């Protein structure tokens, strides 16, 4: 099976090994046993996140739940893109129980550092919780600041997003938590970006900006360049990139 642009898309088994034949939708994640379950996403709504300004300077802290209520509060986040030796990226389809943009295809893993915590440290913790992998050497390839509203849940994303890249062998064991991940697949990032541009509905609205940092990791993505909120209804007067949310 190929993607819309003709690039192969390869799903994973629960253990992380390629499965044939590959499907466009990816491979569903099987439920874990009670002992293997790693926690409901709602359990993190009371966790603290770091509030920041548009340069990434820390301003304070609040809870995950409060930060994502309208009109939203700008806070630090991270998005991880795991790539294999062939340059493909591991995508996850967000679980149905997610409070923001459930059942949308997104990057490998994302989340929020605790106040004062390094993004890479928090990212490796979440890689273990969501995918059962890690620790992984992570490199920051850019920052993406965006604003996004979920029309279904009414939650708001307003995030200073550190985009982190790491390498993971395609045959590495992966043990996704079904409370976090509905499906996984390996895909060509350029093909995903093209498919997203043609039909954004199946994808998390921040994925385009995150993939752009992977495909074009240049200085133009630094804090002074485009750290302004992105809005789902179009670009605002202050140069904000449109997006959608986490």
Image (tube, rainbow, N blue to C red):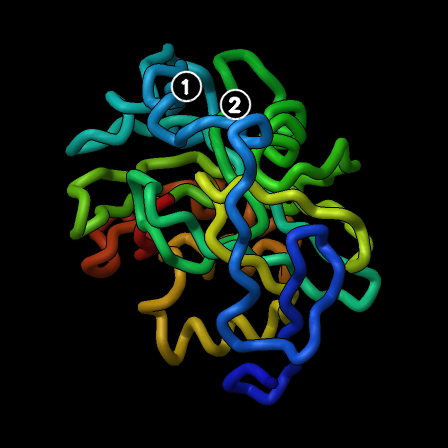
Q: Earlier in the sequence, mark 2 or mark 1?
A: 1
Q: Secondary structure at mark 2?
A: loop
Task: Examine the rendering and report whether any part of residue 163 can be seen.
Answer: no
Q: Which residue is drawn at the image coordinates 29% and 39% (left, top)?
A: 99
Q: Secondary structure at mark 1?
A: strand
Q: In the rendered view, tell whether residue 82 sits above or below residue 24.
A: above
Q: Nearer the viewer, residue 181 or 108?
A: 181
Separation of residues labelled 2 and 1 (CA atoms): 6 Å
Name the image quarter holding residue 104: bottom left
Q: x and y percent of residue 231 in the render?
A: 25, 51
The label shown at residue 113 is: 2
Name the residue that disc number 1 marks. 49
Q: Which residue is drawn at the image coordinates 66% and 23% (left, top)?
A: 121
Left or right: where does residue 147 sit relative to residue 160? left
Badge 2 density bin: few <14, some 14–19, many ≥20, Cα 10 Å: many
Q: x and y percent of residue 54 in the render?
A: 39, 31
**Tally of numbered tags:** 2
Q: Nearer the viewer, residue 34 or 67?
A: 34
Q: x and y percent of residue 83 in the render?
A: 72, 56
| Callouts 2 and 1 close, C-beta under 8 Å | yes
Q: x and y percent of residue 17 in the render?
A: 75, 59
Q: In the rendered view, tell whether residue 129 sits above or below residue 232.
A: above
Left or right: where does residue 162 sit relative to residue 137? left
Q: Which residue is drawn at the image coordinates 44% and 35% (left, top)?
A: 160
Image quadrant containing the C terminus: top left
Q: In the rendered view, tell whether residue 117 sits above or below residue 81.
A: above
Name the image quarter holding residue 177: top right
């Amino acid at each position: 099976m190929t993607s819309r642009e003709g690039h192969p898309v390869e799903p994973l088994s629960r253990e992380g090994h390629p499965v044939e034949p590959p499907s466009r939708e990816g491979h569903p994640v099987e439920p874990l046993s009670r002992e293997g379950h790693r926690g409901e996403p709602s359990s993190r709504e009371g966790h603290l996140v770091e509030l920041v300004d548009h340069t990434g300077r820390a301003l304070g802290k609040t809870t995950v739940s409060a930060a994502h209520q309208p009109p939203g509060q700008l806070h630090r986040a991270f998005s991880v893109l795991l790539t294999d030796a062939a340059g493909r990226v591991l995508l996850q389809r967000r679980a149905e129980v997610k409070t923001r943009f459930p059942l949308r295809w997104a990057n490998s893993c994302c989340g929020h550092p605790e106040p004062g915590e390094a993004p890479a440290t928090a990212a490796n913790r979440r890689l273990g919780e969501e995918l059962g992998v890690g620790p992984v050497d992570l490199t920051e390839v850019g920052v993406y600041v965006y604003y996004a509203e979920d029309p279904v849940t009414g939650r708001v994303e307003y995030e200073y997003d550190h985009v982190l890249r790491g390498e993971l062998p395609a045959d590495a064991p992966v043990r996704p938590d079904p409370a976090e991940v509905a499906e996984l697949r390996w895909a060509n990032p350029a093909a995903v970006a093209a498919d997203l541009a043609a039909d954004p509905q199946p994808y998390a609205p921040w994925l385009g900006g995150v993939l752009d940092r992977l495909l074009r990791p240049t200085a133009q993505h630094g804090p002074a360049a485009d750290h302004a909120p992105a809005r789902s209804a179009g670009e605002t007067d202050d140069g904000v990139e449109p997006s959608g949310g986490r």
